[in-house]
Amino acid sequence: MTQTGITELQDVLWKAAAKLRGSMDASQYRDFVLGLVFLKYASSAFPGIPETARWPAVVSGPGPIGGRIDAAMAAVMRAEPSLDGALPLIFGAENVDQRRLADLAGVIGDARFTGRDRESARDLLGEVYEYFLETFARAEGRRGGEFYTPKSVVKLLVDVLEPYKGRVYDPCCGSGGMFVQAEKFVLSRRGRSGDIAVHGQEANARTWRLARMNLAIHGIAGDLSARHADTFYEDAHPGLLADHVLANPPFNMSDWYRDSGDPRWRFGVPPAGNANFAWMQHIVSKLGPRGAAGVVMANGSMSSRQSGESGIRAAMVEADLVSCVVALPPQLFRTTPIPACLWFLSNDKGAEDGRDDRRGQVLFVDARSMGTLLDRTERVLTGDDIARIAGTYHSWRGGPSASRPYADEPGFCRSAALDEIRDHGHVLTPGRYAGAAETAGEASEPVRDRVERLTKELLTRFDESARLEQVVRTRLERLDG
C-alpha cells in the first residue's frame, strides 16, 4: 500500500474510533480501539487460536458483540502464553455502547490490512497501531506523555546510539516505542529480527499492556516482565547489563519510592522531590562494560544546583560517563511544556573499533533552533535535523559511522574538555559551550577589524538611544504642561 493509502486508512480508522467518543473519555476508548486493532492482527497471525476467536466469527456471531470480543481476547491469551494478561477484557461491560462498538468493529473489519504477504500486512497493522498511539497521546494531552515519546525524538536517540546488536533496555518503556524504533533501525541496516534482545518494564498497568501488544504486532520478542512494576521499588531485571539503554523517564517526578541506602546511588542520593538523577543513576547501573545510553531529561538536569543534584551531576561528569548533551528545540513534546534535552552516556569513550579517543571530553550540541512546526503547539525534528545531529555525534566519535572529520561549529556544537566543564561548575547547558553562530562575513573578518566595526556599531546605537530618550522626555513634558 502506498503512503497515501496508509494515510487514508488511518484517517478512516480514527473517524471510526470517534464513534465511541460520546460514551467514554479518550483514555478509555484508546484501550478499546487498540485492542480491536490487535485482535484483527491476531486473528490471522496466530495459528493456534480457535475459529470462534477469529475475526469473521467475532463480528457476525450471536448476542452482544462485546462478549464475543472478550471471549476472543481470552482465547488469544490462552493460545499465546507470552500475551497472558496483556489483552483488555473490557468489551462486554454493561456501560459499553454495544451498537457503537459493533460499528467500530465493522469499520476495522472492512479496512484492507493486506499486503503481498503476511509480513507486509503485519507492517501495515504496526503502522496503524503506532498512528493510534500518537493520535491518542495528542488527544489526551499531558496524560498522553505517560505512554508516548514523539517519534522524531525516538529516532534521534536510536540513530545516535545505533543499536545494531545486543541487549536493549528501557526502565520506563511506556508503550514500547523505543524498542519498535530500535528494531526498525536494525532491519534498515540489513540486520535480522532477533539481533537485539529487548528488556523493559513499566509501572502503569494499562500502558504495560499497550507495550506488550505493540511488540507483538511488530513481531518483536521481548521481556517486559510478567507484570507491571515500579522500577525504583521492584527492579524487574536485576543483574541485567545492557549494551544500549533508551529511556524517556517522567520529567521531575516528585512522588517516587526512595531508599537512601539503595546501591544504585553510586554518585549521591537523589533528592526526595525530584527523581531525575535517580533515573539517571539507575540507567548507569544497567550499562554493560561498553554500554551506552540515550536519555530524555528535563532541561533543569543540566544546571540544577538544588538538593544535591549538582553534586551528582559533577560526579557523573568526573567519572567520564557523559559523552554528549543535546539541547532540544521547544514544543517537541505536546504533552508537557517543560523544555527538554538529551543525555548520552557511555562506559567506554576510548579508541576502540577505530574510534577516536574521547576520554575527558564531552560533545555539546545546541539544537534549540532546529525543527519544523506542525501547528502552533507542536514541532518535529525533520529527517535532515536528525541526520545533522546524529552525524555530528558520529563524526566526533569517529569510526565506521563517521562520514566526515569532526569540527566545532560556533552556535551549534563544540567538544569541551573536563577542565573547562569544571570551570563552569559542571553545568552542561550546550549554549554555554557552543556559543553564538558566526555569520559568513564574521568568520573571515580579521579580529581587529571586527572589534573596530562592532565598537562603532555600539557607539552609534548609544547615540540613537540618547536621541530617542530626549524625544520621549520632550513629549512627556508637553503632556505635563
Image: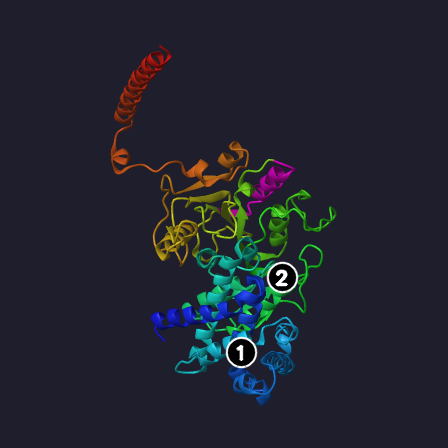
Left or right, 414 with respect to 194, comes to: left
Secondary structure, mark 1, is helix
Which residue range is magenta in the image?
Answer: 306-324
What is the residue that sits farthest to the front in this orientation? Answer: 481
Q: Nearer the viewer, residue 262 or 250?
A: 250
- According to the image, label 2 marks what residue? 202
Residue nearer the viewer, 10 or 464: 10
**Type of amino acid at the residue the image marks with label 2:** Glu
Name the colour scheme: rainbow
Q: For residue 66, what is the image quadrant?
A: bottom right
Find residue 158 and report its horizontal and vertical position in percent: 47, 59
**Which three-letter amino acid code belongs to the residue tagged 1?**
Ala
Q: As rendered, which of 26 and 431 lies closer to the eye? A: 26
With respect to residue 88, does 228 lie above or below? above
Q: Name the residue under label 1.
A: 102
Image point 64% across, 61% down: which residue? 204
Decide which of tag 1 and tag 2 comes sooner along the chain.
1
Q: How crowded is mark 1: few (under 14 residues within 10 Å), some or many (20 or more)?
A: some
Res 480 label: none
Pick the quarter of the image with the C terminus: top left
Labels in figure, total: 2
Q: Is residue 236 left or right of residue 326?
A: right
Q: Is residue 452 above or below residue 360?
A: above
| Residue 351 in view here | yes
Q: Give SS at disc 2.
A: loop
* Residue name at image x 37 percent, y 39 percent: 411
On the image, the x and y values in percent for residue 23 come to 57, 66
* Disc 1 to disc 2, C-alpha distance: 32 Å
